[in-house]
Image (spheres, rainbow, N blue to C red):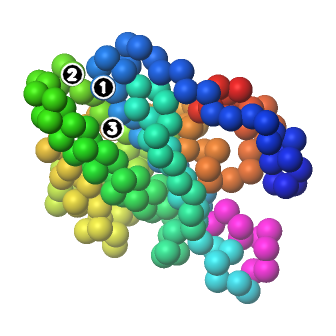
Amino acid sequence: RIGRYLLATRDRGMILDPNQELADLLTVDCYPDADFAGMYGHEKSSDPTSVKSRTGFVITFGGCPVTWQSKLQTETALSTMEAEIVALAHSCRVLMPIIDMTMELLSAFDMKLDSTTMKVSIHEDNAGALVLGKTLPPGFTPRSKHYAIKTIWFREQIVRRGIKLLKIDTKEQLGDIFTKGLPEPAFIYLRQKLIGW
């Protein structure tokens, strides 16, 4: 199925059409998502990787994708919220250096950086992950205490850097395309938003 898709779209590419308003504001958006135990019941149930969740995310700059990733999580998540938090933490490990690099480039060109010139947002579709992400460290939610310690560093970074953690509708979650096979209309819709066709 993947081979047929790649063969049929071999003459297509990524259309980078930055939104001028977003580019002028230096808008960086991160869309993390997870598929909780996505292969369980579809593959061999005795295979330990079938219960691993999949992390997927895309980071856009000015509305154009600059980095994306899809990979199995290394630990077995015990809930959807935990899988989403692991995906959120992983995407933050990629997002923070992008923010730092942008700030370095601005300072190298003697450009002023403040909250009106750079806007960074993380778009999350899981309510539990949003609650934990917005909880100031070292606080945690009752169901997250067994993995809350691992989340302290990115929650501190979100607060320190003034990153907005926003709720997004699952249908608009660009990271969803990197976590699982989607129905064709949803796939085409997200592909259009990401690469322009």
Is residue 134 covered in magenta? no
Q: Give the percent coordinates (x, y) of residue 66.
A: 46, 40
| Above or below for 134 versus 35 | above
Quick one: 83 or 69, which is closer to the camera? 69
| Residue highlighted by disc 1 | 26
- Few, some or many C-alpha atoms within 10 Å of disc 2 (few <14, some 14-19, many ≥20)? few
| Residue highlighted by disc 3 | 165
Q: Amino acid at mark 2?
A: Thr
How many angstroms separate mark 3 from mark 1 (CA)? Answer: 17 Å
Q: Secondary structure at mark 2?
A: loop
- Few, some or many C-alpha atoms within 10 Å of disc 3 (few <14, some 14-19, many ≥20)? some
Quick one: 98 or 130, which is closer to the camera? 98
Q: Are marks 1 and 2 in contact (CB under 8 Å)?
A: yes
Q: Quadrant of the C terminus?
A: top right
Range of magenta residues = 37-45
| Residue highlighted by disc 2 | 117
- Residue for point 36% across, 33% down: 28
- Place residue 87 in its image quadrant: bottom left
